[in-house]
Amino acid sequence: MIDLYYWPTPNGHKITMFLEETGLAYKIHPVNIGAGDQFKPEFLAFSPNNRMPAMIDRAPADGGAPVKIFESGAILIYLAEKTGKFMPSDLRKRFDVIQWLMWQMGGLGPMAGQNHHFNVYAPEKLPYAIDRYINETNRLYGVLNKRLADREYVAGDYSIADMAAYPWIVPYERQGQKLEDFPHLKRWFETIRAKPATVRAYELGPRVNSNVGKTFTGEQKKVLFGQTAAVVKG
Ligand SMILES: N[C@@H](CCC(=O)N[C@@H](CS)C(=O)NCC(=O)O)C(=O)O
């Protein structure tokens, strides 16, 4: 059984997309990040960066002690290795998937996250910061669009690289982007959106957080923004 520590955000959806595709048994433990669940000592014990998703596999393949993992990219690689699915075993093909997964983890995710912050949440509208992240998101959409010009998925067959990138394209409007400007990306996005496992994964969102998709309240912003080292001291 997989214990998934989750809240319905882009990084959370990556993992439920994988779990729904494979049918692995899992139990959701909600981590209400707007209420501060991510700072609880019992959560920090296996997710020291006070971020979700995190995962505990209580039945690892080697029959040994439970495996505890934080960082969505690491969780996806682990689950792909555990199931033998959505990441090829061939050396070159595997690293094609891994490099695009790292591109999402180091580029698309963080840049789109800053885009959301300055474009939607920041109390002051700072044109330099807004332009910087809208432009960088635009560049990254361009990279993905070009990559998808002559292939159906990001790296070979549908893989963890696609599952990592897709949830960060879902809020494209909030990121100041138009899918019409990126026809190959749009085709890929619509293909993944129509997958039954994607539909099931996204249906979980409102069941775990009835306010999913709404902007953060003032109280939630106080919890989420302005964090310093003090939040992980406990
Ligand atoms: N690189 C991390 C990022 C995880 C992340 O930023 N999670 C956010 C929600 S999408 C979170 O838990 N935020 C809680 C907080 O900011 O305190 C991953 O991919 O797992």
Image (cartoon, helix red, strand yellow):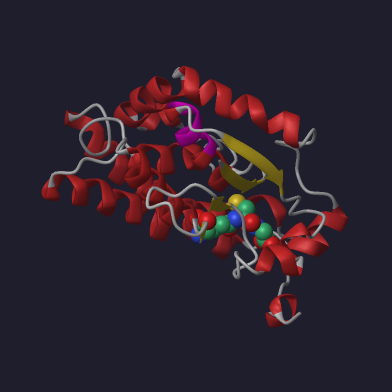
Depth order, front residue of 88/100: 88
Q: Is residue 4 magenta?
A: no
Front in this rendered view, residue 195 or 176? 195
Question: What is the residue that sits farthest to the right in this orientation?
Answer: 219
Toward the viewer: 33 or 179?
A: 33
| Residue 36: percent from left, percent from top | 79, 60
Residue range in magenta is 16-21
Measuring 56% from the left and 52% from the top, which residue is drawn there? 55
Q: Is residue 162 left or right of residue 15?
A: left
User: Which residue occupies 59% across, 28% down?
Assistant: 202
Which corner quadrant of the image does residue 187 belong to? top left
Residue 129's place in the image compared with 145, above or below, is below
- Give the residue at x 54% y 21%: 199
Res. 122 visible in picture: yes
Q: Position of residue 158 (x, y in %)?
A: 30, 31
Residue 214 is situated, as x and y percent measured from the top left of the image, at 75, 38
Number of marks in picture: 0
Task: Classify residue 39 as left or right of residue 202.
Answer: right
Reply above or below: 57 against 156.
below
Say left or right for 143 vs 134.
left
Judged from this view, the residue extending furthest toward the front is: 63
**Left or right of residue 67: residue 212:** right
**Residue 182 point in image, percent of width and height:** 35, 32
Give the main secondary structure, helix, strand or loop, of the magenta stretch. helix
Q: Is residue 177 visible?
A: no
Look at the image and tell me in which quarter the N terminus lies: top right
Q: Quadrant of the C terminus?
A: bottom right
Name which quarter of the figure residue 186 lies in.
Answer: top left
Ligand 1 falls in quadrant = bottom right
